[in-house]
Amino acid sequence: SFGRAELMTLIDQCTDAAGLLRLVEKHGQSFDADHVFVAWGTVREMPSAAGRGDEGLVLQRLQVLTRGKIGEWDAQLFTIGVNLMAELHLTKRMEVDDELAGELQAGAKAKLGDFKPQDVSILILGLSRMGILDAGLVAAMQGRARETAGDFEAQEIAQLMSALAIMGIRLEPDLLAAMQGRARETASDFEAQEVAQLMSTLAMMSIRLAPDLLAAMQARATVT
């Protein structure tokens, strides 16, 4: 058997699904939460087999292993892990099974108070794309964004608004007010690209900025 560090290295260095599948089948019982997390990243970096053959099998095994370890991931690992799974789902390499979907929902709610501004937009996109962002979790995520509005940077404001718009999620009025207030405070930090992203997002959502904030954004749009 391998030690923890050696097993981590072997997982990280796998270059094909067959090799990772052998590791999972032989040593999966020894995987800790970090091993499982690294395995998701390893699969993502492999050439796609569209979920067929060994790739499909290893992704099924990983979902089972993840159900037993996801509670040990901190907020940052959880967010990255969801993003990895969402990428694999989007590229039609896997479908998240019902049991893992339930654990992802429960995990997001349990770790809600630990999520940072950047995490919120990533999770909204990732969970939505996998079809497991229910109404209660949408409300909780918007609530977390409202609670941490004072910590949002210009880029994170643009990313959050974009995530909500892309997934067709209704923006709660109090969150809109909080984000507009924070945008006023950080207006001088917006880059032209972030202004363009924010303005196009708001147009998609049929939201009009307050005149003073609109003027500030238009001024930033000319800054290179």
Image (spheres, rainbow, N blue to C red):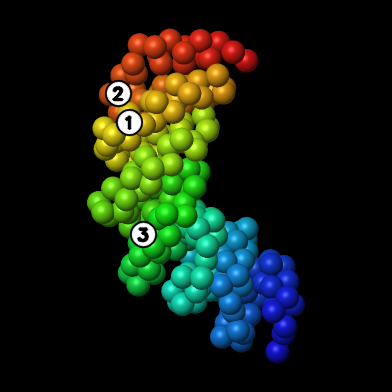
Give the mark, 2 or 3, whose residue is nearer the N terminus.
Answer: 3
In the rendering, which numbered label is found on residue 207?
2
Q: Amino acid at mark 2?
A: Ile
Q: Position of residue 62 (x, y in %)?
A: 51, 73
Residue closest to the far bottom: 1
Determine contact: label 2, label 3, CB under 8 Å: no
Q: Is residue 76 above or below residue 185?
A: below
Residue at point 48%, 23% (across, down): 185
Q: Amino acid at mark 1?
A: Leu
Q: Give the alpha-carbon distance from disc 1 to disc 3, as whole Å.
A: 22 Å
Residue displayed at 55% across by 10% down = 222
Residue with the mark numbered 1: 176
Q: Earlier in the sequence, mark 1 or mark 3?
A: 3
The quadrant where residue 100 appears: bottom left
- Residue pointed to by mark 3: 109
Q: Residue at x 44, y 74 (%)?
A: 67
Q: Position of residue 165 (x, y in %)?
A: 35, 35
Q: Secondary structure at mark 2?
A: loop
Give amino acid for label 3.
Lys
